[in-house]
Image (cartoon, grey):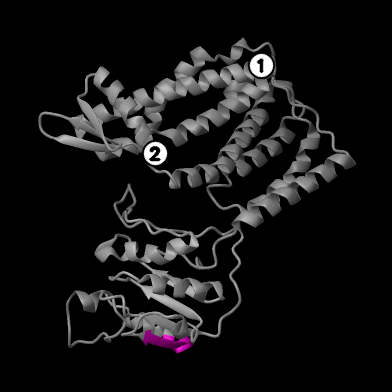
Amino acid sequence: MIGGVWCSAPKHLDIRYLVLLIPLACALIFVAFPYNLGLVVLILGLLVSLLFSTRKTAQAIPLGMTLAGIILLVQTMVFPFYMSFVSHGHRIDMLSPLVSFVANFLGLHTSTNNGILFIQTIQQTYPITLTWEKLGCYLSLNMFLGALLLFVLFYEKRKILKNTIIFLLTSALYIITRFVAILILYVTTTELSVFWDPVAMTLSFLPFSFLLMKLLPLKDSNETFIHVPSLRLTKKHLIAMLMMFLLVFSFLGTFLFQDPGSIKNGRVLIDEYHSQWEDSIRPLDTEWYGLLSTYNYYSWAQWLGYHYHVVKNMNTTLTTEILNKYDILILKCPTESYTTQEIQSIKHFVENGGGLYLIGDHTNVFGMNTFLNQISEEFGIRYKTDATYELGTGDLSTYRSDPLFSHPVMTCHSV
């Protein structure tokens, strides 16, 4: 970024911008790594501007650092929205016919069925699902955010729209072509890492950068330098910033804050009637062995009993009369379906302030997640049936709860 702005004869940063160091430093306290990288680079850029405040020829150093920090900050702010969007629609089945057409044109033999792309070779047929990650859409989104900021800095409004449209059309064509090239590489090497390896992904997008340099050269701008307006803070500006902060804080709090509810009396009911797997009935000892002695919840239930009044439901269906005697209902690894009457009773129990604790599996073994969904979907929760592992190591995925606005049930790190 420093090298890029050096030729633009940039104006020096207004020294009054250093007042921004106060809110940026405060934000560092709450924003965890690596999401604070943009803040760190932006703060360093503002501090370096002090060193070069009298050197016009070196103003590109703090300006480049500041610009890089702003781009990183914008990318980080957009990331949660991208993650939420992608998690609710992981696959892009509608693009499989288009990818198949381009792949056949470039020499592959492919077909599609139910959104899955099948690559036919002499040895075997490879089924490939199309996802946002495999297409490299996240990296492309970050490039777009950076380019959009440069368009705003260099061009007038009409040209900003024109260049944005060119960028998006070029991105769509390149993403499809790049994915077909990745498919060819995968068929040749049978290495799944070609879809996600950071080095391979970076190298695959370098031609896109050079293409954009030809299609959208910033040197065509009518401006000879980057506009860095002077900072003018009046009473109206301060009030506007305060109101904007309150608006953003209230908006995020409304959607992200989870009310933990009132503290219960601690009467817990563990349902064993619907579960023939991982029960909490027989204690661990040296007299019995096998799967049920390994997949066992007895010690867990015993630990709960040290702190709460715990009862195990062994042989009765769940009714409103039974549930009204307890504060917390635990549905654990069910292997049988719940009746309509039981579902309504549990829903009524929760609506009246009862706590519901659901335990599933990272797969749908014995249909337990399907059975849990009978209950959880009444409250807007759905268990998925796909097991996930860390791509780099093959180990189980590790979940780390968000330090800000985390759900009350996520009180610690879990695997």
Give the residue displayed 79% in from the left and 34% down from the top. Answer: 15
The quadrant in which residue 405 appears is: bottom right
Q: Position of residue 243 (x, y in %)?
A: 79, 47
Q: Is residue 268 magenta?
A: no
What amino acid type should be assigned to the residue bearing mark 2?
Glu
Which of the pair 23/352 is nearer the observer? 352
Q: Is residue 42 left or right of residue 356?
A: right
268 to 232, vertically: above or below: below
Looking at the figure, which quarter contains the C terminus? bottom left
- Residue 121 coordinates in the image, percent (x, y): 14, 29
Which residues make up the magenta segment? Answer: 305-312
Mark 1 near mark 2, Cβ–Cβ under 8 Å? no
Residue at the disc numbered 1: 158
Three-letter code, disc 1: Arg
Per the image, label 1 sits on a secondary structure element best described as helix
- Name the residue furthest front: 341
Residue 309 vertical placement versus 351 (above, below): below
Residue 307 drawn in magenta: yes
Disc ID at residue 133 = 2
**Residue 134 badge:** none
Quadrant of residue 317 within the rendered picture: bottom left
The structure residue drawn at horizontal position 84% and vertical position 40%, both measured from the top left corner, is: 237
Residue occupying image coordinates x 42% and y 58%: 382
- The answer to whether one can see residue 361 in this image is no
Note whether residue 221 is visible. yes
